[in-house]
Amino acid sequence: MPLLKEKDQQAVRERFAKELKNPVKINFFFSREDTSEETRITGELMDEIGGLSEGKLDVESIEGKDSERARRLRVDKMPALVIYGDGDERDNIRFFGLPAGHEFATLLHTLITVSNDYHVELPDALVEKVRAIDKPVKIQVFVTTSCPHCPPAVVVSHYFAMLNPMITSEMIEANQFDDLSRRYGVQSVPMTVINEGKQTFIGSRKPEELYNAIEKAL
Amino acid sequence: MGHLDIGSIFKQESDVRDTYDCVIIGGGPGGLTAGIYAARGGLATLVLEKGVEGGTLNFTPVIENYPPYSSIVGMELAQKWSEHAERMGVTILHEGVVEVSFFGENLTVKTDQGRTIAGKTIVISTGSSYRLLGLPSERRLAGKGVSYCALCDGALFKNKKVAVVGGGSSAIDEALYLAQTAGSVTVIHRRDQLRAEKALADKAFQNPKIRFYWDTVVVDIEGEQSVESLLLENVKTKERAREPFDGVFIYVGLDPSSGCFKGVLDMTEDGFIIADPHTLETSVKRVFAVGDVRQKEVRQIVTAAADGAIAASFIIKKYF
């Protein structure tokens, strides 16, 4: 049985037909030892949406953190999705855990943005500032899939990574990565952690505020 | 396994005009229903929603009192509602309103993206937001064990001991939701009985993970980095006790989201917008208020929807 309801499949198919432009790669990294339902569903869901894209989405499943590709794309935990444009092999737009519930919209939006030459919806002045960041930045946005506030926080963080390869953006499903959640004391989502805790904040903030937090963390 | 729940994937920003027949501020049940009726009446209709279409529905785990759904997930109902509105031709724009200017027939709203939009008529359906307990420690520990969204944060308290403060339907709703994953749920209520509807209360009474502290208020929330304990007081005996908790979810009522209409529209002392009960027109002609934000007796999804239908029907009849 497909994961998506018939009407959702149709909506996704239509949206992809209208909005996907260039081909997009989805690399799904998983571990054979991980038999969790979420990981299995993540893989199936990617195959399913790949099938709704008329070949625009190229989904590849890769086993193992020690695989050559995982090393090249800096995949340090799994399950992971790394998304990039055809031919660029960027490693800085990432989802850790199952992007279901409200995060499914984030995933679709990310795929469509990558497909449209990484064209982000941010003010020009801010785009310039984000592009000018010249030190490595890691943004981790902890979410749960039932959280209505969470998608904007992930979208903005992913936008920043699309603008600047120095910035790595990760959506992290807090339950599936509970060790990591515990390390940063995640008790409310969305929680954004910059550079391993140099700056943290809770809630979906304006893009300018994310930029200010990054500046403080550097 | 059933089908996967997915959020709203229909978010698209169509071309936005400068003027609409009807500008609706807030896309919850009241606003979307007003939109559906206005659009079906032939009015060019815009709904401004700063968060997710469906508003508070998205924060309600399960809804059992919106007929004829005996049980529906809040997010799903929210999606159906916004799909319905869009299918009828309502434009939904994801921007919040920061300022309004209502002079005579000149009604404009300014959005948080700096856009100014004029409406021949305006419907206010901004709803309400959760009320704070008002303790200094509550702000300090917000997001560190103090939460106002069980749906968002509940899963982070798996097998933990949590408290829910409040005795109304939303408090009991959340207690039942939390009981699915938390180790135990203690409902702390200042009265000796629940205000929640009976069907919900009965469910909670039967749930072995939920217990009740009656006549009890939270005097302080304690903890350094995160919530560690609550200082509780029995309002009758004035006895105080400290008890360890990992998290506390607060549902002590709702405040109207009417800040940007202060001084512009007539309101109650608590900030609820006063509207004519028959037409829902406010003290300013062509401006209407529907749903939780207006002064009324019963605040339910079904009454918000009814408000939306009444206001839009009256708008069509009187102004177009």
Image (spheres, helix red, strand yellow):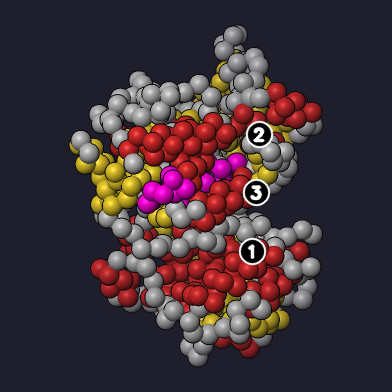
Magenta-drawn segment: B38-60
Residue A156: image x %, image y %? 42, 64
> In the drawing, what numbered circle is on residue A140?
none
Q: Nearer the viewer, residue B111 or A63?
A: B111
Q: Nearer the viewer, residue B1 or B228?
A: B1
Q: Amino acid at mark 2?
A: Asn
Q: Residue at x 79, y 68 (%)?
A: A1
* 2 or 3: tag closer to the N-terminus: 2
Question: Could you tell me which chain the residue with mark 3 belongs to?
Answer: B
- Does residue B92 appear to the left or right of A24 in the view shown? left
Q: Quadrant of the C terminus of chain B?
A: top left
Name the quadrant containing residue A80: bottom right
- Does residue A183 appear to the left or right of A4 in the view shown? left
Q: Which residue is mark 1?
A: A8
Q: Residue at x 50, y 21 (%)?
A: B297
Q: Is residue B111 magenta?
A: no
**Mark 1 residue element:** helix
Name the mark nearer the viewer: 2 or 3.
2
Q: Which residue is mark 2?
A: B65
